[in-house]
Image: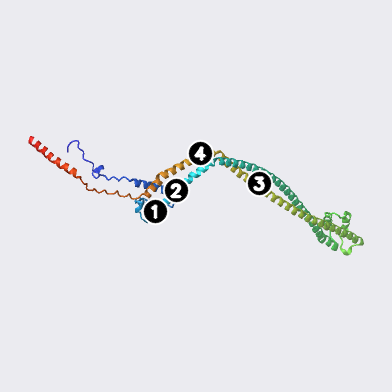
C-alpha cells in the first residue's frame, strides 16, 4: 500500500455521498400561502379543535384546484374556511374598534374615574360617621345592660334573703311546736324532774315573749303530775299556755309577712330578669349593628382604594390601550395582507384560457416579381461560370 494512503473508515462505507442524497423539493408558492392560511385558521377563536383539524387538513388540496374545476365538497370546505377567516377578521376589527372607542372616550373616562373616587370618599366619610354612632349606641347599651345586671343581682340577693328568713321563722315555729309536744305536754301530764323542767324553760326562753318569773314558777308546778296541781298551778299553766299561744301567733303572723315579702321579691326578681334580658338583647343588637357598620366601613375603604388606584393609573391605562390598539391594527393589517389575501387569491383563481393558434396562409407572388426573378437567375449562373474558369 502506498505511503500516505489511509484506508477509509468502515463507518463511512455505507454513507451516501452528499451529492447523491435526495433533496426535498422546495415548497411551491401556493403551498407556502396555504401554510399561512392554515396557521391563521388554527388561531381562529370560537372554532372547535376538531373543525380546525379538518379545515387545515382538507383546505390545501382544495385550494390547489382552480375555482372552475372544484367539486361540491371542495367548495364546501372553502366556504367553511371563508366563514372562519371572516369571523377571525371580525374579531380583529372588533378589538381595533373597542380600543379606538376607549381612546375616543378617554376624557369621559377620566371624569368617571374622578367622580367615582369622589363618591367613594364621601361613602367612606359616611361609613365612618355611622360606625361612630353605632359604637356610641353599643357603649350605652352595654352600660344599660350592666345596670340591669346589677339590679338583677340585687333582686336575687333580696329574694334569697327573704327565703332564708322565711325558712328560719318556719324552723322556729316547728321547733316551738316540737318543744310544746315533746317537752311541755309530758311535764303537764306526769310532771318531771328538775333537769327536764330547766330544759323546757331554756327552750321556751330562747323564743322570747315568755316572762321569766312565770318560767321560774313552772319549776314547782311542772314537777307534779296533773292530778296534784293546785289552783295556783292551774293558773300558772294557763298563763304559760296563753304565752305559748301568743308566741305561736306571732310566729304565724311573721310567717305570713315573710311569705308575702317572698312573693314580692320573686316578682321583683322576675321583673329584673326580664329587664336584664331585654337590655342584653338590645346590647347584642347594638353590637351586631356596630359590627356591620365596621364591615361596611372596610368595604367602603376598599372601594375608595380601588377608585383612587383607577384614578392614578388613568394615564398608564390610556397608554396601554393605545399600545393595544397599535398591536390590533398591526395584527389586522398582517391578517389582511397575509392569510386573507392569500386565501382570496387562491379561492378565486380560475384556470387560464389557452392562447389562440395562428395558422400560416400561402402568399401570392405578383407576375412582375416572377419575371424579375427569372432575369436575375441566368446572370447569377454566368457569374459563377466566369469565376470557375478564372480559377
Q: Is residue 139 above or below residue 229?
A: above
Q: CA distance from mark 3 to mark 1?
A: 68 Å
Q: Nearer the viewer, mark 3 or mark 4?
A: 4
Instruction: Provide the residue designation for mark 4.
Output: 319
Q: Nearer the viewer, mark 2 or mark 3?
A: 2
Q: Is residue 100 above or below residue 53?
A: above
Q: CA distance from mark 2 to mark 3?
A: 55 Å
Give the mark nearer the N terminus: 1 vs 2.
1
Q: Determine which of the numbered discs, if any, sits on residue 290 in the image.
A: 3
Q: CA distance from mark 1 to mark 2?
A: 17 Å
Residue at 16%, 43% (x, y): give it. 371
Viewer-proximal residue, 24 or 304? 24
Of the 4 image quadrants, the one containing the C terminus is: top left
Q: Is residue 381 left or right of residue 315?
A: left
Instruction: Provide the residue designation for mark 1.
Output: 77
Q: Residues within 10 Å of mark 4 (few under 14, many from 20)?
A: few
Amino acid at each position: 500500500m502506498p505511503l500516505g494512503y489511509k484506508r477509509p473508515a468502515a463507518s463511512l462505507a455505507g454513507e451516501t455521498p452528499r451529492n447523491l442524497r435526495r433533496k426535498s423539493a422546495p415548497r411551491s408558492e401556493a403551498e407556502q400561502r396555504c401554510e399561512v392560511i392554515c396557521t391563521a385558521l388554527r388561531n381562529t377563536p370560537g372554532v372547535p379543535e376538531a373543525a380546525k383539524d379538518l379545515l387545515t387538513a382538507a383546505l390545501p388540496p382544495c385550494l390547489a384546484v382552480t375555482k372552475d374545476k372544484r367539486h361540491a365538497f371542495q367548495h364546501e370546505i372553502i366556504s367553511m374556511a371563508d366563514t372562519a377567516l371572516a369571523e377571525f377578521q371580525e374579531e380583529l376589527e372588533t378589538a381595533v374598534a373597542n380600543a379606538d372607542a376607549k381612546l375616543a372616550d378617554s376624557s369621559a373616562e377620566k371624569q368617571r374615574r374622578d367622580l367615582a373616587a369622589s363618591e367613594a370618599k364621601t361613602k367612606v366619610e359616611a361609613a365612618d360617621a355611622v360606625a361612630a354612632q353605632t359604637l356610641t349606641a353599643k357603649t350605652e347599651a352595654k352600660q344599660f345592660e350592666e345596670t340591669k345586671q346589677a339590679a338583677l343581682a340585687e333582686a336575687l340577693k333580696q329574694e334569697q334573703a327573704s327565703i332564708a328568713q322565711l325558712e328560719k321563722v318556719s324552723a322556729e315555729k316547728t321547733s316551738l311546736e316540737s318543744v310544746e309536744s315533746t317537752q311541755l305536754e309530758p311535764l303537764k301530764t306526769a310532771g318531771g324532774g328538775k333537769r327536764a323542767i330547766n330544759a323546757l324553760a331554756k327552750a321556751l326562753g330562747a323564743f322570747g315573749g315568755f316572762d321569766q318569773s312565770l318560767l321560774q314558777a313552772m319549776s314547782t308546778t311542772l314537777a307534779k303530775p296533773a292530778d296534784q296541781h293546785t289552783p295556783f298551778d292551774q293558773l300558772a299553766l294557763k298563763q304559760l299556755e296563753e304565752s305559748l299561744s301568743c308566741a305561736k301567733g306571732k310566729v304565724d303572723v311573721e310567717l305570713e309577712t315573710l311569705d308575702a315579702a317572698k312573693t314580692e321579691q320573686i316578682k321583683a326578681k322576675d321583673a329584673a330578669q326580664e329587664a336584664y334580658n331585654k337590655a342584653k338583647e338590645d346590647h347584642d343588637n347594638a353590637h351586631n349593628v356596630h359590627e356591620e357598620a365596621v364591615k361596611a366601613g372596610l368595604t367602603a375603604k376598599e372601594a375608595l382604594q380601588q377608585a383612587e388606584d383607577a384614578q392614578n393609573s388613568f394615564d398608564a391605562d390610556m397608554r396601554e390601550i393605545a399600545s393595544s390598539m397599535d398591536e390590533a391594527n398591526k395584527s389586522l393589517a398582517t391578517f389582511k395582507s397575509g392569510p386573507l389575501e392569500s386565501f382570496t387569491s387562491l379561492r378565486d383563481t380560475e384556470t387560464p384560457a389557452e392562447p389562440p393558434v395562428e395558422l400560416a396562409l400561402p402568399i401570392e407572388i405578383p407576375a412582375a416579381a416572377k419575371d424579375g426573378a427569372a432575369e436575375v437567375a441566368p446572370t447569377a449562373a454566368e457569374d459563377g461560370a466566369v469565376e470557375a474558369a478564372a480559377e
